[in-house]
Image (tube, grey):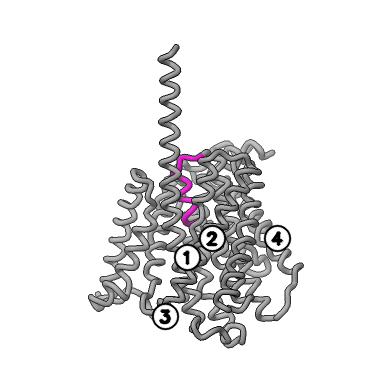
Amino acid sequence: MEEATIGAILAIGAAIFIGFFGDLIFRKLRVPDVLFLIALGIVIGPEVLGKSLGIDILPPPDEMAMIQDIFLTVALAVILFDGGLNTNIKAVVQSMRLSLVMAVLTLITEITLVALVLHFVLDLDLMVSLLLGSIIGGPTSAIVIPVMSKMRVPQKTKAMLVMESVLTDVLVIVTAITIINVIQIGEVEPLMIAWNLAVKFLVGGLVGLGAGIGWLFVLQKLRDQPLSYMLTVGALFIIVAAVEISPINSSGAVAALAFGLTLGNREFVKKRMTSRTLTFPSNEHIQHFSTEITFFVRTFFFVYLGLMFSFSTFGDIHMVAGLVVISVICLSRRMTSIFVARIGDLEEDDANAVFASMPRGLAAAVLATLPATALEGMPVWENVPAWIQPVDAFFLNVVLIVIVGTTVISTILAYATERGIDKRRRIALRRRLAQDSEI
């Protein structure tokens, strides 16, 4: 085997081990494995071990672009599908109003604040500033879903934050692409934007729901058959691809979530169907296999984020801009958590969980390299201040700093929230014991 192949195989094995023990650490210390996996990616990347050992496990840049698009699409579909499988649909319905308010409020606030800061402080064009703000405008389901699934907050709060992250994943992608289209054609079309959003959410959700109901009947026929989950994964990928192609042009991410919600809440679906032919639940092993395959995909996604780091392209302006954007995100998230806690009558632990749920990741990583390709040669992209050039490296590095920074902050806040829950439970226990002793 070639050295690059050997290095890649070793990296795969190391990633699985780090991911497994990172998950154990999270269960005991509430420190997400995300940080360990990103650090592993940086260490085995081309500028650390790769440089010292002379082994480059990354493919050439022209091949990397295609692999990146496929990998990130698969990762998003699998993670959202697993999130749907393990989410109570009743909790989703109950929390949808707050989820929608949080998603829209967070996106608008962060895009506006980030754009204003970059425009007036760094003298970056306003439309380019809005574009960067939209790319990092909301939390990612790739981190929120696994972290929330293990936090000790009410199911309603978990469902609310999961749905918010899913909504913002789609909103961020649609908003960023819309801003790119506006820059390209030079005018804003509100009706087109509203129509695109409606198609992305409604059509994708209906297709995923319909496919999920149909697949329940398929699983009933395949019960006790081996490889039924792998067939389900195949159906998932077909659905995700089908809703993205013309003339549907909807969201594969939303379809994946709806497909998972339907399969994961099969009893809820059965009770509301007029047909009585669906008498058996789907295979219980689907949840177990889904958890393992999602672990595999998540592990390599975060290692991949670490591999994307290139210290040689980092400049002081990138770090300053990244830290400023992170500060804006924290401020915006704090305001959002306070507002939502008041209108939703949330407990202190729930409000803290909302504040902690700020990490960026999958959607931002997907979009970070898109503007350089879509806006290449356009004056608004080329005519930027000298201290920001090259602007494509500025975008990528700032986004990566924001991903790592918000993940670290979210980890600290989630840990503090868990400690606060433990403390309040101990105080409540002492009070009950004191009252019992008095009696």
Tag of residue 402 = 1
Which of these two is toward me, 282 or 25? 25
* Amino acid on which the number 1 mark rests in the picture: Val
Number of the front mark, 3 or 1: 1
The numbered mark, 4 or 1, whose residue comes first in the sequence reads 4
Residue at image x 64%, y 73%? 179
Q: Secondary structure at mark 4?
A: helix
Q: Are marks 3 and 4 in contact (CB under 8 Å)?
A: no
Mark 4 Cα-neighbour bin, 10 Å: few <14, some 14–19, many ≥20: few
Q: Secondary structure at mark 1?
A: helix
Three-letter residue code for mark 4: Ala
Inspect this view and state whether residue 394 appears: yes
Q: Main secondary structure of the magenta part?
A: helix
* Residue 308 shown left or right of residue 183 in the figure: left
Q: Residues within 10 Å of mark 2 (few under 14, many from 20)?
A: many
Q: Is residue 382 left or right of residue 27?
A: right
- The residues tagged by marks 4 and 2 sit, at their Cα atoms, a distance apart of 27 Å
- Lateral position of residue 243 relative to residue 361, left or right: right
Spatial separation of the CA atoms under disc 2 and disc 1: 9 Å
Q: Tag 2's secondary structure?
A: helix
Direction left: furthest residue: 53
Taking depth in this image into account, of 8 and 273 the one nearest to the observer is 8
User: Of circles 4 and 1, which is in front?
Assistant: 1
In the image, the segment drawn in magenta is: 142-153
